[in-house]
Amino acid sequence: MQEIRRADKEDISRIAEILVFTKRVSYRPIFQNDQFSFINLQVLPLAQEYQADKDRLERTWVFEDGFVKGMLETEGEELTKLYVDSFFQRMGIGAKLMDFAISKLGVRFLWALEKNTKAIVFYRAHGFGLTGERILEEGTPEYLVKMERR
């Protein structure tokens, strides 16, 4: 049964797995930093972060269809994360998560990596537009761009 629900402790390892592997696929070509991608970015430490921060888990929602295939995280009206396992992308899961974030959680804005053009196209398709605001991604030469619901 397909559902979007608040994440719970049993989802933590799956959330960490989705985040780590999807970030590697999406961001390694942009940052080209193997140290970060394969040494710093690991499933167990990320899962431990979620385990230790109950507030973070409260702000996290998962798409489940037999098992967790995607997730989103918010802070107030900001979408801070939206990831779908690479194996299940292009199946409408991201769209369902985004629609949920907008209609049920009141998401109004987000920051996206400027060079992540696939993500920007996806967000535009869901009514987000570039505001013109840019900031450096901490510790990198890459920019984040702010996108807001029109």
Image: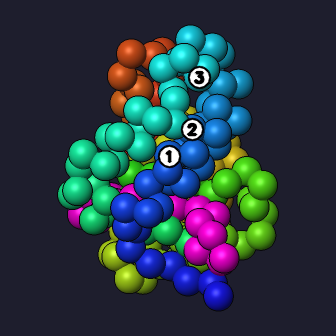
Q: Which residues lie in the magenta part? A: 64-78
The x, y position of residue 130, in whole percent, is 48, 51
Residue at left 39%, top 52%? 80
Count how many numbered circles sit on residues in the image.
3
Would you say the residues marked 3 and 1 are in contact, meaning their CB atoms lie under 8 Å apart? no
Dot 2 amino acid type: Val
Mark 1 burial class by Cα count in 10 Å: few <14, some 14-19, many 20+: many
In this view, the mark in front (3 or 1): 1
The x, y position of residue 76, in whole percent, is 24, 63
Identify the main secondary structure in magenta.
Answer: strand
Residue at left 50%, top 46%? 16
Question: SS for tag 1?
Answer: helix
How far apart, in angstroms, are the residues tagged by discs 2 and 3? 8 Å
Relative to the observer, which residue lies in front, 138 or 42?
A: 42
Relative to the observer, which residue lies in front, 147 or 110?
A: 110
Mark seen at residue 37: 3
Residue assigned mark 2? 20
Residue assigned mark 1? 16
Question: SS for tag 2?
Answer: helix
> Coloring scheme of the render?
rainbow
Mark 3 burial class by Cα count in 10 Å: few <14, some 14-19, many 20+: some
Dot 3 amino acid type: Ser
Whether residue 23 appears in magenta in the rendering, the answer is no
Mark 2 burial class by Cα count in 10 Å: few <14, some 14-19, many 20+: some
